[in-house]
Image (cartoon, rainbow, N blue to C red):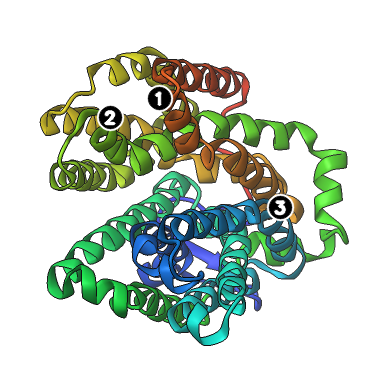
């Protein structure tokens, strides 16, 4: 059986020959994360402007809340997407699942971009908005698992960590793009223009990015491990994971529980928390977040390469151990100073980068080919929905009730759980996915 290592940066095609994996292929496989986080941030940033268009007039505050509830409902469909699309990838191929995922994601963006208002179609308007978010939730749930599996399976032996790092590189770039686009559009058309029509622009841009990604993915080859293992495919991959690989599923949950809470707290919520709690200006918080995310993005490929040399466990352990030590001091150091926020976010995101660069491939390496996508996607999406999606709400609720200092201890406990899982999981960097 061929062993992919060294200079043979190639993958097996259906005919049995090998050819190099192009940079275009890496971009095509990982670009879904860019669209995912572009859509996420666009919805949150622009919801205050489009919410009145989807609900009866005269209730702007309630409309904003209802719009965010629709967002949360879509988020809850991520676990189902991890199961359905992950199973589809294991049954019908990684390339087909990546294409389907992107089609759903782009379709959801398009529906929001052209969705009629409440004034035009009445109660059907929020129903269409909900349908778009459900479709995007399903797509997002399957995207991470399938793209992580694809990148792990096409990467040469000894370079999977490097390839894996691009999942979060593109995701962070998508998040940054949405944030900067929001500032650009607001500066050009003002709040009035944004509320009248310009809120549709980011979703139109998301649609264009989605169809461009779909075009790129049409040229992807199927992975060698999947093609070589077609005779071993199972009819019900989800049931196979539950029956034969429960330990792998629990390890994925343990890998994720601390990291997803950290991600949604430090990357998504912390700038707004600094504004609402310490009175920091929105511009200062924005630029602190942009710089910190930029530093992490640059560091991710280097961390991926490092993991290919020293293993996944050391970097994962540095992430979790670092937060066990620092998360409580991080929150105690927060103030109205933008420089303090920048230092905390940069340090925190560099620590998170030790997870982000290697976790997708480390989790894919836990499962055999015939259940790899659903084995990763099902527990990962469930834990993200339960712990990641609730982190911003929990920290705000505790703060509102005078117990904001409890939240960092909650994060500490979850990272301690992840640290225990990392330390007890065998090293996987030398696993041959062709076996």
Residue 399: which disc? 1
Q: Residue furthest bottom?
A: 120
Q: Position of residue 282 (x, y in %)?
A: 18, 46
Among numbered discs 3 and 1, the one appearing first in the sequence: 3
Coordinates of residue 224 in the picture (x, y in percent)? 62, 64
Residue at the (22%, 61%) spot, across then down: 180
Q: Is residue 434 visible?
A: no
Relative to 56, residue 218 above or below: below
Q: Where is residue 400 drawn, in percent x and y?
A: 42, 27
**Alpha-carbon span between mark 2 and mark 3:** 40 Å
Pointers 1 and 2 in contact (CB under 8 A)? yes
Front residue (pair 341, 251): 341
Residue 72, numbered circle: none
Q: Position of residue 103 (x, y in %)?
A: 56, 77
When asked about the image quadrant of residue 203, the answer is bottom left
Residue bearing mark 2: 277
x 83%, y 64%: residue: 231
Crowding at dot 3, Cα within 10 Å, few <14 / some 14-19 / many 20+, comes out as: many
For residue 264, which quarter of the picture?
Answer: top left
Q: Earlier in the sequence, mark 2 or mark 3?
A: 2
SS class of the residue under badge 3? Answer: helix
Instruction: Residue 210: tell me if it is visible.
Output: yes
Task: Determine which quarter of the picture holds residue 349.
Answer: top left
Q: For the residues carrying marks 2 and 3, which lies nearer the camera in this image?
A: 2
Q: Nearer the viewer, residue 189 or 19?
A: 189
Above or below residue 375? Residue 220 is below
Task: State the residue position of label 3.
Answer: 374
Mark 3 in CB contact with mark 1 (< 8 angstroms): no
Label 2's element? helix
């Amino acid at each position: 059986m061929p062993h992919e290592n060294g200079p043979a940066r190639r993958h097996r095609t259906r005919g049995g020959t090998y050819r190099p994996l192009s940079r275009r292929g890496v971009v095509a496989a990982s670009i879904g994360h860019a669209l995912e986080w572009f859509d996420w941030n666009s919805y949150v940033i622009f919801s205050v402007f489009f919410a009145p268009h989807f609900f009866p007039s005269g209730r702007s505050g309630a409309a904003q809340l209802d719009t965010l509830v629709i967002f949360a409902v879509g988020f809850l469909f991520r676990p189902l997407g991890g199961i359905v699309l992950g199973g589809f990838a294991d049954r019908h191929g990684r390339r087909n699942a990546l294409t389907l995922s992107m089609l759903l994601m782009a379709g959801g963006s398009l529906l929001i971009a052209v969705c009629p208002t409440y004034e035009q179609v009445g109660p059907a308007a929020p129903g269409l908005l909900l349908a778009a978010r459900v479709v995007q939730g399903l797509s997002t749930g399957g995207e991470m698992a399938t793209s992580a599996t694809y990148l792990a399976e096409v990467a040469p032996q000894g370079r999977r960590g490097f390839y894996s790092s691009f999942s979060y590189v593109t995701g962070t770039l998508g998040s940054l793009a949405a944030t900067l686009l929001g500032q650009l559009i607001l500066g050009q058309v003002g709040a009035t223009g944004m509320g009248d029509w310009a809120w549709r622009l980011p979703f139109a841009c998301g649609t264009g990015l989605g169809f461009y990604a779909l075009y790129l993915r049409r040229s992807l080859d199927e992975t060698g491990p999947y093609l070589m293992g077609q005779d071993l495919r199972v009819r019900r991959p989800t049931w196979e994971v539950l029956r034969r690989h429960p330990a792998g599923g629990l390890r994925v949950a343990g890998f994720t529980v601390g990291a997803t809470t950290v991600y949604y707290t430090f990357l998504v919520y912390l700038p707004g928390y600094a504004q609402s709690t310490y009175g920091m200006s929105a511009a200062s918080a924005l630029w602190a977040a942009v710089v910190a995310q930029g530093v992490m993005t640059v560091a991710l490929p280097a961390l991926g390469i490092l993991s290919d040399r020293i293993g996944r466990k050391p970097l994962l352990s540095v992430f979790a151990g670092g937060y066990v030590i620092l998360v409580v001091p991080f929150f105690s150091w927060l103030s109205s100073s933008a420089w303090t926020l920048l230092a905390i976010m940069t340090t925190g995101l560099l620590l998170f980068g030790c997870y982000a660069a290697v976790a997708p491939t480390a989790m894919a390496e836990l499962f055999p080919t015939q259940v790899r996508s659903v084995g990763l996607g099902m527990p990962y999406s469930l834990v993200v929905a339960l712990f990641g999606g609730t982190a911003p709400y929990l920290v705000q609720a505790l703060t509102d009730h005078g117990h904001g200092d409890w939240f960092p201890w909650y994060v500490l406990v979850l990272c301690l759980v992840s640290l225990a899982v990392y330390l007890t999981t065998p090293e996987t960097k030398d696993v041959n996915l062709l076996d």
